[in-house]
Amino acid sequence: MRQFVQTYFDDIFVHSRASAGKTAVESHLGHLREVLLRMRENRLYANMNKCIFGAEEIPFLGCFLGKDGVRADPEKVCAIAQWPVSVSQKDLRKWLGLANYLHKYSAN
């Protein structure tokens, strides 16, 4: 199960690829079934309002995770592009903090 399940605090991520003659969707359904059965055996329950199934990418810690890697949240990119000119040291530090966070997602 550790091959297709990752956890972060109380979040569970199930990821799947096509293998052994099964499509990625078929593999994913099998993996989900296994995880949900294991949760049921241990009387653990998921909040269905917070669940995302079969997504190409998911939001996580201010970015998006997907099969192609990690990308910045477009809202954060838009926020930095529309940020007003800083007039105080405090405002400049806020902008620099966000810019520093987002720089790892930039090609240039």
Image (cartoon, rainbow, N blue to C red):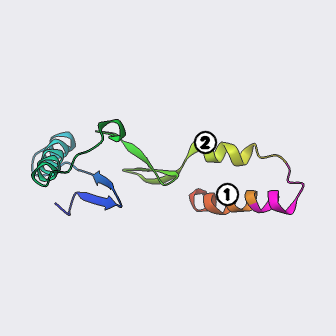
Residue at the image position 35 percent from the left and 36 percent from the top = 49
- Counting residues from the start of the chain, the first of labels 1 and 2 encountered is 2
Q: Is 89 part of what is drawn in magenta?
A: yes
- Identify the amino acid type marked 2: Glu
Give the residue at x 58% y 62%: 104
Question: Which residue is located at x 13 percent, y 48 percent?
Answer: 40
Q: Position of residue 60 (x, y in %)?
A: 45, 51
Which residue sits at x=57%, y=57%?
105
Residue type highlighted by circle 1: Leu
Q: Secondary structure at mark 1?
A: helix
Where, quadrant-wise, is the C terminus in this rendering? bottom right
Taking the view exactly as shown, the residue that stands out farthest to the right is 87
Residue 75: mark: 2
Q: What label sits on residue 77 in the rendered view?
A: none
Give the secondary structure at mark 2.
Answer: helix
Left or right: residue 104 compared with residue 97: left
Residue wearing tag 1: 98
Residue 80 in the image: state x and y as whole percent: 71, 49
Extreme residue in the front direction: 43
Q: Which stretch did the figure color magenta? A: 85-93
Furthest-top residue in this view: 49
The answer to which quarter of the image holds residue 50 is top left
Q: Position of residue 24 (x, y in %)?
A: 21, 44
Front-lying residue, 42 or 50: 42
Q: Nearer the viewer, residue 64 or 43?
A: 43
